């Protein structure tokens, strides 16, 4: 699961643009997020990109007078580092953004299967294509695809179903050119619930596919 803490200060400056320093660290602030792409997106349609250095620091000049969201690049594509927040940046200013996040595990949201089956539905391909691109970009990363279910149908049934679904995702990535040696697939059944299986909402949250960086 990804966790985020955002700290932003915008101060007055004589410049006609806003100069931002982005500091990206892991959630526990123990190590920098090295060589990661940071995207600053404006409500007016502008986008500015920078890459963090070995200390997790990136500097980017953006247009003032707009409201921005902060995005990061990961193995499943871009994700919202600002966790839904946005900030108005004055015309003349400078500031610092501290981003603390873990990006070693993602839900493959949008990956869906027919009920009780392991065939990928058409709607799954968008996020899977983004994952292919991410794995091509970060070509030394090894990952685990994990399948999870609710508790309907019993232990053995769900162990087999979750494994088959994880295998289906792995097979898709391999067919798209990702080396099979980089991907493992594990079905956990309902042994790792995220929510209460006694409710329909909880069951829906527990039915998921995750991708985790293992190396």
Image: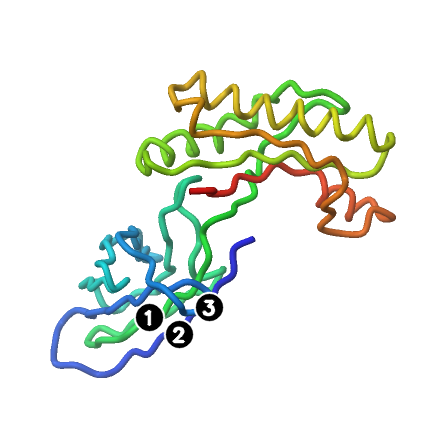
x, y percentage for residue 18?
A: 20, 70
- Residue 34, horizontal then vertical, whole percent: 29, 56
> Reading the chain from its start, which is encountered first: label 1 or label 3?
3
Foreground of the two, 175 or 66: 175
Judge by depth and name the residue closer to the eye, 60 or 66: 60
Q: Earlier in the sequence, mark 1 or mark 2?
A: 2
Q: Compare residues 177 and 16 and report the one nearer the observer.
A: 177
Instruction: Tell me the number on the disc at residue 40.
Output: none
Query: What's the distance in space between the residues labelled 1 and 3, CA to CA?
Result: 16 Å
Q: How is the image coloured?
A: rainbow
Quarter occupied by residue 164: top right
Locate residue 46 relative to residue 127 in the image: left or right: left
Q: Residue at x 78, y 39 (%)?
A: 150
**To which quarter of the image does residue 189 belong?**
top right
Is there CB contact under 8 Å for labels 3 and 2? no
Instruction: Look at the numbered discs 1 and 2 and tell me whether their residues touch, using CB distance below 8 Å.
Output: yes
Disc 2: CA contacts within 10 A as few (<14), some (14-19) or many (>=20): few
Q: Mark 3 packing: few (<14 Cα in 10 Å), some, or many (20+)?
A: few
Residue topped by disc 3: 28
* Mark 1: secondary structure: strand
> Disc 2 designates what residue?
7
Q: Which residue is mark 1?
A: 97
Tell me what residue is drawn at x 67 percent, y 21 percent. Answer: 118
10 Å neighbourhood of mark 1: few (<14), some, or many (≥20)? some
Label 3: state its secondary structure.
loop
Q: Is residue 68 above or below residue 108?
A: below
């Amino acid at each position: 699961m990804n966790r985020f803490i955002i700290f932003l200060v915008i101060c007055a400056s004589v410049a006609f643009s806003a100069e931002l320093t982005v500091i990206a660290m892991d959630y526990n602030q123990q190590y920098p997020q090295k060589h990661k792409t940071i995207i600053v997106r404006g409500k007016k349609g502008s986008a500015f990109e920078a890459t963090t250095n070995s200390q997790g620091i990136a500097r980017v000049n953006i247009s003032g007078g707009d409201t921005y969201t902060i995005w990061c690049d990961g193995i499943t594509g871009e994700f919202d580092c600002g966790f839904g927040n946005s900030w108005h940046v004055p015309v003349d200013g400078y500031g610092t953004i501290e981003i603390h996040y873990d990006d070693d595990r993602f839900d493959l949201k949008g990956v869906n299967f027919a009920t009780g089956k392991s065939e990928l539905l058409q709607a799954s391909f968008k996020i899977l294509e983004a994952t292919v691109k991410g794995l091509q970009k970060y070509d030394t990363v090894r990952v685990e695809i994990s399948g999870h279910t609710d508790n309907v149908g019993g232990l053995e049934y769900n162990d087999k179903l979750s494994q088959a679904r994880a295998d289906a995702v792995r097979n898709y990535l391999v067919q798209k050119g990702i080396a099979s040696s980089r991907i493992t697939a594990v079905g956990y059944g309902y042994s790792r619930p995220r929510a209460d299986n006694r409710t329909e909402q909880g069951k829906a949250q527990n039915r998921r596919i995750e991708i985790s960086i293992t190396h």
